[in-house]
Structures are given as structure tokens and as C-alpha cells.
Image (cartoon, rainbow, N blue to C red):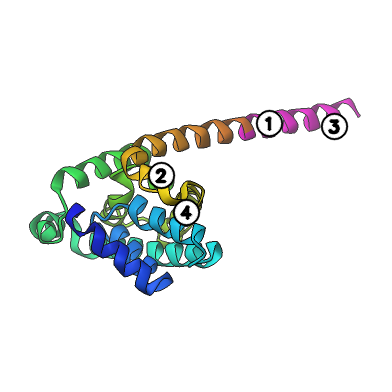
Amino acid sequence: MEQFSVYFMEFIAAWGYVAIAVLMAAENACIPIPSELILGFAGYLIFDGQLGFGGALVAGMVGGLAGSFFAYAVGHYGGRSFVDKYGHYFFIKKSHVDVAQRWFDKYGLKAVFFSRMLPVVRTFISLPAGFAHVDAKKFFLCTIAGSLPWTALILFAGMMLGKSWQVMLAIGHEASLIFVGVCVVVIAVLYLRHRRSKKAEAAAVDAE
């Protein structure tokens, strides 16, 4: 895919939001186009005044959801045997699907949420969700919840880096892991605060 990077950037520069949606759909449909390339370059175009943040975010989300549901449908109706047999025609590596499968087997639907922010797994997690025939509505909600912060973050990072946006191509994987770590800490803190609040309310009621 690296040899096509220039063509992808030219496509985004020429077609803007449409190109972002198309490429994000392809990436989430398991064609390994780095989202850091798509959204990072889009962020640079926002920095340069050629695109708007809101429009790029919507385009990225719409494309990502479309691609995710396509991959989910392939997994749901085709099954693992179909993907193993024909996936290599679309640059899908069995080893990548295996990684996503292990994540899904271990964490279930939670993996659909968290993996959207992780390298490799985010591209392929829709397949094992389809293999398992998970509820489509729950899959949709988990996909939105995981994709929205990631899409917004990469666009914002590209915008902030400006002409140096390609730095993300080198550190994208590490940044993903840091971002997930921060999300886990924030969720844990909010959960603990919620529990303490509930205990305090219960104690107040008992005192009355």
C-alpha cells in the first residue's frame, strides 16, 4: 500500500470529503490503507484552509461506518472460510485476521470499541464480529463509540502538525497505544467516581 500513498493524497486533495469517505470505507472494509495517512493528510488540508474540520470528521465517520458494516456483512454471511479463501485478493492477511479474532474471542463486543484505536486490529475487528453474528445494533454503537474519538484525534493531530503531519506515519502505532491507555485511565476514574457517588447517596438515604 505504501507505493500508492501519493495517489491517495492526490485523490484526497482533488476530491476532498468524498475521497476521505471512500478511502476510510476501504480501510474499514479491511483493505490496509493507513488511517493515519488518510486522516493525517486531511488534517493538514484543514490546517491549509482547504477543508473544514466538521466536514472531514463527518466524511471519515460515514466512510468508516460503511466499510465496517461491509466487513461485518462479509464475516456474517461468508464466514471465516470465505475470508481465508478469498481475502488475499484484497490484501487481507490471515495473520491479521487471527489477531483480530483473538481480541474478539477474549473481549467480545468491548473489543469492537477499543480496537478502533489500535493498529492492525481496528481494520479487521469487524470480521470476527460478523463471524460471531453479534447484534448489528450493538455492533453499530460500539463502532461509533470507538471510531469517533479516534477519527477526531487523528484529524486534529494532522491539523496541529501542519506541514509536519507525516510524523504520524512513523509514530502512529505508538500514539494509538498511548491514546488507548489514556482512555482506559479516564474510563476507570469516571467509573470509580460514579461508584463513590452511588455509595454516598446510599449512605445518605440510610442515615435518613
Are the two marked residues, 1 and 2, in contact with CB atoms closer than 8 angstroms?
Answer: no
* 114 to 190, vertically: above or below: below
Q: Is residue 14 above or below residue 153?
A: below
x, y percent for residue 139? 41, 56
Q: Alpha carbon of mark 1 to alpha carbon of mark 4: how far? A: 31 Å
Q: Which label number is shown at residue 193? A: 1
Q: Residues within 10 Å of mark 4 (few under 14, many from 20)?
A: many
> Given contact means CB atoms under 8 Å apart, are the residues at marks 1 and 4 in contact?
no
Amino acid under disc 2: Met
Mark nearer the N terminus (4 vs 2): 2
* Residue pointed to by mark 3: 205
Q: Nearer the viewer, residue 151 or 137?
A: 151
> Of the residues shown, which amino acid type is indicated by label 3?
Val
Query: As drawn, is 76 to the left or to the right of 165?
Result: left
Quickly name the residue at label 2: 117
Dot placed on the residue nearer the N-terminal end, 1 or 2: 2
Residue bearing the label numbered 4: 155
Which of disc 3 and disc 1 is earlier in sequence? Answer: 1
- Alpha carbon separation for disc pair 1 and 3: 18 Å
* Marks 4 and 2, how far apart at CA: 13 Å
Tell me the SS state at disc 2: helix
Which element is circle 3 on?
helix
Q: State the SS at label 4.
A: helix
Sequence-wise, the earlier of marks 1 and 4 is 4
Left or right placement of residue 62 versus residue 169 in this view: right
Depth-wise, is mark 3 or mark 2 nearer the camera?
2
